[in-house]
Image: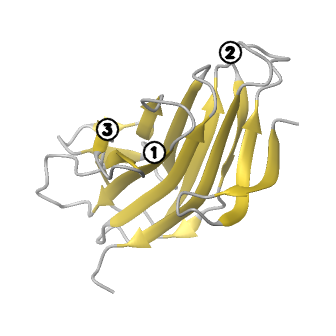
Amino acid sequence: TENSIELGIDPLGRSSPLWKCTADITKPNAFDGGWQTYYFGVSDTKTYRFVVYLKRETMDGGTYSDIYTDQSPAAVKLNGTDATLARIYGGNPPQTGRWYAIIGYVHPWNTSITTSIGGMYDMVTGQKVANCTDYKWKQGTTKARHYSFYYGCQVAGSTSYFWGPRVEVCDGT
């Protein structure tokens, strides 16, 4: 299987269960592990922060973090155009063997925000190392799910880890 739970060191230096993705490449350049949540309730009038931590052991394949909703299209880009695929992040971290936080936001449907504030952050230096894409809820959205995965490996045994996925309402509480 390409998914397993393994005890390891999390981004905070503690021993924790990690989600391990190991490419078996029975289908090269395809899904190589990851997860998606069940749908959960959201309000299209609130901002939500989507977070997952990533550590890659190889640079084979790519890492992706997406949002799906009960609407079609899934969300709206900050410039007001429809986003059939609401991809927070897609690519590779700067280096292997280091934890990174992938953080993306979905803002209220009527927000005036036009610039993404999300990003990928190096957990050693705290520096932002890549931009992530923020979205707006499509008006009427009541359900969403978070999807993070490892994809497109060409070498069997290529490995990626996820830890600490969460979705937070950004309302000051």
Visible residue check, residue 146: yes
Is there CB contact under 8 Å for labels 1 and 3?
no
The residue located at (17%, 60%) in the rendering is 111
The outermost residue toward the right is 1
Q: Earlier in the sequence, mark 1 or mark 3?
A: 1
| Residue assigned mark 2 | 29
At a point 36% along the width and 48% down the height, the residue shown is 121
Q: State how far apart marks 1 and 2 are (Cα).
A: 27 Å
Q: CA distance from mark 3 to mark 2?
A: 25 Å
Instruction: Using the numbered discs, state the Cα–Cα distance from disc 1 to disc 3 in whole angstroms.
Output: 31 Å
Where's residue 73, x and y in %?
Answer: 42, 42
74 vs 95, nearest the viewer: 95
Quadrant in the picture for the N terminus: top right
Residue 143 % position (x, y): 51, 64
Task: State the residue position of label 1.
Answer: 72
How many marks on residues? 3
Q: Amino acid at mark 2?
A: Asn
